[in-house]
Amino acid sequence: MRITLLLVGATDKKYLNEGIEDYQKRLIHYLPFELRVIADIKNNRHLSADQQKEREGKLLLDQVSSGDELILLDVEGTELSSPGLANWIEKKMLSGTRNLIFVVGGPYGFSEPVYKRADSKISLSKLTFPHQLIRLLFIEQLYRALTIIKGELYHHA
């Protein structure tokens, strides 16, 4: 199975990039992993939140093929524990899922067409995090899930 983390806009904080790069290097030892960035919408100061979501949504959907499974990281999604996420991913692996695409949207969330295309929604917390920080949190949780699946000692609880 291949996993892609699809992001809207580049991560501009050095400390976040360093953490993301560290976990990205770790992940490739478990499965094919790609981090893909969609460029920020230019001149977005003149757009409403809905207009920005629509434009980002079109760019996001252009990155998804018909056979891909699209999972939105969304506050309204299902909350999972770390072992729960590991179990969910392992079931996807065993079911023959070929491509999982997890998406971190822009600051206003997702457009309606993106929600309609999504196969699942996962929430990392009821708390609100900056969309750039959630990238690091998710990639660490993805790594943690894979170590749980492999029975490694990274996860101690």
Image: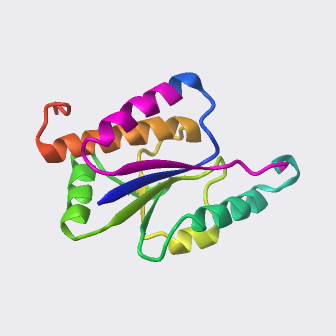
Q: Is residue 28 magenta?
A: yes
Q: Which residues, given as a range, are shown in magenta?
A: 17-43
Q: Is residue 85 magenta?
A: no
Viewer-proximal residue among 26 and 132: 26
Asked whether residue 130 is in view, the answer is no
| Residue sitting at x 60%, y 62% | 60
Most extreme residue toward the bottom is: 66
Identify the image quadrant of residue 155.
top left
The coloring applied to the image is rainbow
| Residue sitting at x 39%, y 38% | 24
- Judge from the rendering whether residue 24 lies leftward or rightward of residue 116; answer left or right: left
- Judge from the rendering whether residue 45 lies leftward or rightward of residue 9; answer left or right: right
- Judge from the rendering whether residue 7 lies leftward or rightward of residue 121; answer left or right: right
Most extreme residue toward the top is: 15
Quadrant occupied by the C terminus: top left
Question: Looking at the picture, how far across and down is residue 67, in whole percent?
Answer: 41, 75
Asked whether residue 69 is in view, the answer is yes
Question: Looking at the picture, how far across and down is residue 121, in whole percent?
Answer: 43, 61
| Number of numbered markers | 0
Viewer-proximal residue among 63 and 149: 63
- Judge from the rendering whether residue 153 lies leftward or rightward of residue 142; answer left or right: left
| Residue sitting at x 34%, y 58% | 2
